[in-house]
Amino acid sequence: MYINEIAVGAGIQITVAIGMQTMEFTTSVSQVFNDCIYAEPIFKNDKMIGFSTKGLVLSMITTDAESGRAWQFINISIRNIRDADGNLFHEIKCKNDAKAINRRGACRVWIGEPGLATTGMGKPPIDVTVKDISISGISFLCDRDNEIPDGSVVHIDFRDSVTKTRFSISAIVVRREDTERARVVYGCKLNQESPAIAKYVNEKQREKLKAARQMRAKPLIGKDK
């Protein structure tokens, strides 16, 4: 998908990254041109937000209404403009085509730790159970009445009770699965791969393999000699 293929009225989420910190802003497409789109202006404290600060890494996610598939545009540029009628917009450009957000992840390890998920500015965090994690994705369980659309950016905070490591992870929701007992699983793709998460996953995999070897080596009680 190219940027001029996004439909007028489509919702978009802009992710602003600087170092390991990220912020998300939601808006919609007002006009589409050959090489850019105009998005409805985003205001904070009655001032239009700007995205021209040096060092910012900007990306954008939109979900196709017909297929339900999420698309991510990397390294976009945004500048604030005023059209001939005096209306304000964010002009968004991207030289490259978007990448479909892959719903398949790498090998995941079980976590089972409580955590909090935040889905937008000003919204209260949701109590979740972090189900599993991989170098490219994470999933969590929460009550079914928490509706999080595909393509939403979510921040997940949890602490591993064994290693005492704390994580604050930004990810994109790519699937939803209903379970029993009024619970739902949300599968997410990480916004960016992290050496710290890769190390954590590898350590968890080694612990699992070590435990499996110990179980195989343990003698069976009552086995005939």
Image: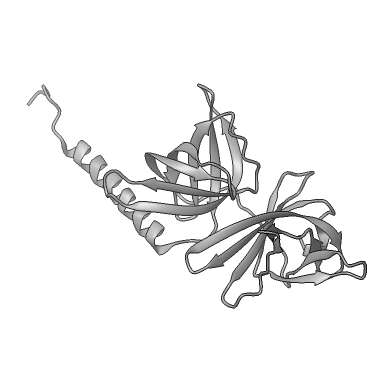
- Looking at the image, residue 45 sits to the left or right of residue 87; the answer is left
Judge whether 194 appears above or below 114 on screen: below
How is the structure coloured here?
A: one colour
Residue visible at 63% across and 53% down? 101
Residue visible at 64% across and 70% down? 75
Whole-percent x, y for residue 181 in the image: 50, 21
Whole-percent x, y for residue 190 in the image: 52, 54
Q: Residue furthest bottom?
A: 54
- Looking at the image, residue 136 sits to the left or right of residue 68; the answer is left
Q: Residue furthest right?
A: 85
Judge whether 3 appears above or below 184 on screen: below
Quadrant in the rendering for residue 66: top right
Instruction: Point out the image quarter for the C terminus.
Output: top left
Instruction: Point out the image quarter for the N terminus.
Output: bottom right
Residue visible at 68% across and 51% down? 70
- Looking at the image, residue 80 sits to the left or right of residue 103; the answer is right
Quadrant in the rendering for residue 91: bottom right
Q: Nearer the viewer, residue 80 or 185?
A: 80
Q: Nearer the viewer, residue 23 or 34?
A: 23
